[in-house]
Amino acid sequence: MTLKKFVLVSLTILLAVPFISSCKRGANDPSFSITSRTARLSAVWTLSSGYYDYLNQENEEFNWVDDDCEDGIGMIEEYQESDVKTISYNFSNSLSHFKHQFTTTRDQFVDGSMMVDGKEYEDALTIERDINFDYELTIRTNGTYRVYITYNLYEDDYLLEALDESSAPQYGKTFSGTYEYEDEWHWTDNSLGSKEGVQFDGFPFLSMNENNIGRIYDINGSFKLNYMTGVEFINQAVIFELDKLESKALTLMSNASFEGYFAEVDEEFEVNVAGQGYITCQGTYTFRNIENTKFFLQFISDGKSVAE
């Protein structure tokens, strides 16, 4: 090989190295790829496994500034109460296992027109179900995407309306259908300017919250039965980390947290305390809220890029 050819080949290799390494961004990206990340991301992806977890914790507290005020005639007692709601979906083999749990330290709740105790309310909002669930995500190189979902849930405990007052209760209903949504996606850059994340302007997902849970109590307010009342979807803007981006495998991850705090001081007012007469009282009310959402989704594809 002549010196001129050797120099030319060497320059070609050196120029190619930055291009090749630039294709690897995520920790589990391939070390070598001749296609760009946009080309690899563009495909028809099918959800194969993963999970989605949601946590909502609410803490409420009321305290008197002066403890003597708690003994005032007709005054409320100091209290601390906590509610915790968790929702999880585990995906595997075209199946979604849904689990909704609710725990509380409250003694009583108003549910509709009935007063029920806290433990009964916990039971009424704790439920697990399996849903037949297929999730297809088509990402196009032109910056748009399409989500197509099919689902099927047979709810054994769904209470049907009686034909007349003498009819025995009838149970069982199927919820099935399709859901389609289109929007835009964007690369998101970190401080180094590398394409480590991708934003979907509206990412549809199951919404099986307490609004989808029916519950039945007897005339005494004792819990008897809960059941799913439907299947719904919500669209939320989500930024995912690309944990893995190969020609036929994609892993999306996201973890978001929120913490809120509210406090107020009740206006001063006169309270009649036994043995002390009227004294000036002041109470403080605080509310704390913690939310956390976590996605870990694994997709597979045939590796064929989609332009439009």
Image (tube, rainbow, N blue to C red):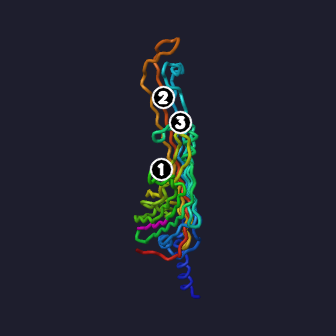
Q: Position of residue 11 (x, y in %)?
A: 53, 78
Q: Nearer the viewer, residue 12 or 3?
A: 12
Q: Position of residue 203 (x, y in %)?
A: 45, 60
Q: Which residue is mark 2?
A: 284
* Above or below, 256 relative to 297: above
Three-letter amino acid code at disc 2? Thr
Q: Nearer the viewer, residue 263 or 224?
A: 224
Relative placement, left or right, of 88 versus 202 is: right
Whichever of callouts 1 and 2 sits on the residue coming sooner in the sequence is 1
Q: CA distance from mark 3 to mark 1?
A: 33 Å
* Residue at screen point 55% across, 65% down: 251
Mark whose residue sits in front, 2 or 3: 3
* Residue at screen point 41% across, 64% down: 181
Whichever of callouts 2 and 3 sits on the residue coming sooner in the sequence is 3
In the rendered structure, find residue 166 and report the number of the disc placed on it.
1
* Above or below, 62 relative to 276: below
